[in-house]
Image: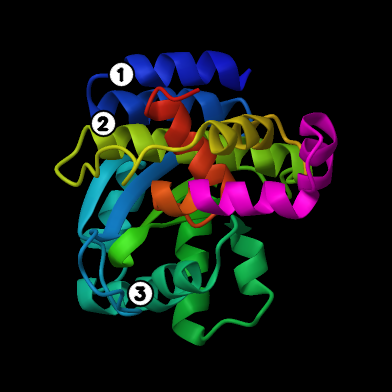
Amino acid sequence: MLDDFTHKVLSCTTAAGVGELFGREIARHGYTSSSCVVIAPSGERPRAGDAPRDFLFRNWSKEWVRVSGQGGFPVKRFAAVEKDLIVGEGRRRRMPFAWQEVAQRGLKPVEAEVFDALSACGWHDGLLVPMHGPAGYFAMVAMASPERDLDLGRNRRGHLQTAAMLAHERALALSQFAQGGPSEPLSARELECMRWVAAGKTDWEIGAILSIAATTVKFHVNGARAKLGARTRAQAAARLVLYGLF
């Protein structure tokens, strides 16, 4: 299914178009709203209190736009909660995390108020995918659902994470924050290892396929990640797809 999504996202010519396509993709998994925001553009030092700088795309309900920016909360008060609860949590994590996983650590009264407001707007569950890049770059893809207790098993979480990364990378390439291609060309072995990473293989499995040691595979994958400015293997694979190197 992601092959079809990848082909379509590469055909998008605007960040808004990427957002619409991403919205249709996650709707199949129960999510009805989404956004992608650049919080710290590349070249700026990461700061835990940074407020959102620019939305690459945003598919929010009119009710939530009203509540978060105009109504239920004073703007400064909501922004302070957002920094700590969403941005702060995203900076501390590398993998996708659900709203309920944040709530389990315990919420301050004002944070609980935000969760209540989300629920009042019809959003009962959500998933956030942090994006870390070179030179302090930080962005987040968020999605929300009117359903409760969505299935977020390993396969579905991985699918949504990969779709989010593809959407982010394409929207970023079409934005003012575009970062271009790899810092230097990947070697043939790095590309070969990354192709198997994208296919979901472990270092041990890749090593068996290529007749090399798992530690050698890890060396080449880490080299590819460094050249691509990616924090995770999934992010590196997404960038290779969008750079046309797969």
Visual colour scheme: rainbow
Tell me the magenta residue range. Answer: 203-224
Rendered residue at 25%/48% (across/down): 55
**Residue holding disc 1:** 12
Q: Is residue 48 above or below residue 67?
A: below
Residue labelled with disc 3: 83
- Residue count near mark 3 (Cα–Cα under 10 Å), binned few <14, some 14–19, many ≥20: some
Question: How many residues crowd mark 1 within 10 Å: few (<14), some (14–19), many (20+)?
Answer: some
Q: Position of residue 241 (x, y in %)?
A: 46, 27
How far across and how far down the image is residue 156, in percent? 71, 38
Quadrant the N terminus occupies: top right
Say which of marks 1 and 3 sits in front: 1
Q: Could you tell whether 43 is left or right of 134 in the image? A: left
Q: Which percent across, then down, holds residue 136?
A: 31, 67
Between marks 3 and 2 in the image, the one whose residue lies nearer the viewer: 2
Q: Residues within 10 Å of mark 2 (few under 14, many from 20)?
A: many
- Among the two numbered marks 1 and 3 on one chain, the one whose residue lies closer to the N terminus: 1
Q: Are marks 1 and 3 in contact (CB under 8 Å)?
A: no
Which amino acid type is marked by label 3?
Answer: Lys
Left or right position of 20 against 6 = left
Q: Residue at x 38, y 57 (%)?
A: 133
Which residue type does callout 1 highlight? Cys
Given the image, on which type of amino acid does mark 2 rest? Ala
Q: Earlier in the sequence, mark 3 or mark 2?
A: 2
Q: Which type of secondary structure does the marked residue at label 1 adopt?
A: loop
Q: Which mark is drawn over residue 15?
A: 2
Mark pair 2, 1: CA separation: 8 Å
Residue drawn where x is 30% and y is 79% of the image: 49
Q: Are marks 2 and 1 in contact (CB under 8 Å)?
A: yes
